[in-house]
């Protein structure tokens, strides 16, 4: 496992909120985070049918363009009754001509689950894959999974995406009802980041 010893890291995202979250994680280790969006990098086309493949595309594109290590993530929800869909196409299911509409996507997903003939509980998983890539082509992969089930109707206005219909195992509230900081401690992304910190940052010398 290669340690991250660089003092600057590109976060392969154009999402300011995601940059803030990752920058806060990196700060205690003396690593400065800058986003692909801030650097004016284009968003590469994600052509893979799995989380690791798409995260690799984003991380390696940013590392190659900047000459710096780059961190990218790919995430989504997989519903067992739908054979793992929407999975890597989670955001695609919300696309409309006017932008992403996750209320529409959640409504459509729930309708498909009902049509599937599956019996409750409607188990699902949130997945997050992180890829840390270096300019020389090397990369490290970290994965996090949060098990849970779909619930209806939608509950809560916290979070984003499918959070209002996802109830994580061990809780009686949805991600959409959960305090943002509480969710950030237990989520699929938190678990992937925990592995990243433990294996690439702790003990690294900057």
Image: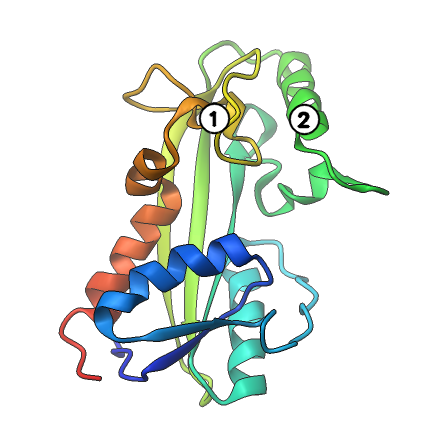
**Could you tell me which quadrant the N terminus lies in?**
bottom left
Q: Would you identify the image quadrant in which residue 92 lies?
A: top right
| Residue farthest left in this picture | 203
The spot of residue 69 in percent (x, y) is: 42, 80
In front of the other: 156 or 93: 156
Residue found at x 58% / y 72%: 38
For label 2, the SS is helix
In front of the other: 142 or 172: 172
Mark found first going from the N terminus, 2 or 1: 2
In the picture shown, does residue 74 fall above or below 106?
below
In three-dimensional space, the C-alpha distance between marks 2 and 1, rounded to whole angstroms, equals 12 Å
For label 1, the SS is helix
The spot of residue 85 in percent (x, y) is: 60, 36
The spot of residue 30 in percent (x, y) is: 25, 75
Residue that mark 1 sits on: 176
Q: Are marks 2 and 1 in contact (CB under 8 Å)?
A: no
Residue found at x 35% / y 35%: 183
Q: Would you identify the image quadrant in which residue 145 lies?
A: top left
Residue that mark 2 sits on: 103
**Could you tell me which quadrant the C terminus lies in?**
bottom left
In front of the other: 201 or 74: 201
């Amino acid at each position: 496992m290669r340690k991250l010893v660089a003092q600057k890291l590109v976060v392969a995202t154009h999402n300011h909120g995601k940059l803030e979250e990752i920058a806060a994680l990196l700060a205690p280790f003396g690593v400065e985070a800058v986003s692909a969006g801030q650097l004016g990098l284009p968003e590469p086309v994600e052509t893979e049918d799995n989380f690791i493949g798409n995260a690799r595309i984003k991380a390696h594109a940013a590392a190659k363009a900047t000459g710096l290590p780059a961190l990218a993530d790919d995430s989504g929800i997989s519903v067992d009754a739908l054979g793992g869909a929407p999975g890597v196409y989670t955001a695609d299911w919300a696309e409309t001509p006017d932008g992403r509409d996750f209320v529409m996507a959640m409504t459509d997903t729930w309708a498909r689950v009902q049509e599937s003939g599956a019996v409750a509980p409607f188990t699902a998983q949130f997945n997050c894959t992180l890829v840390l890539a270096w300019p020389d082509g090397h990369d490290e992969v970290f994965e996090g999974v949060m098990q849970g089930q779909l619930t209806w109707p939608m509950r809560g206005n916290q979070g984003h995406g499918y959070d209002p219909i996802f109830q994580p195992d061990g809780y009686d509230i949805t991600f959409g009802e959960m305090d943002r900081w509480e969710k950030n401690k237990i989520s699929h992304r938190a678990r992937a980041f925990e592995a990243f910190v433990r294996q690439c940052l702790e003990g690294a010398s900057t």
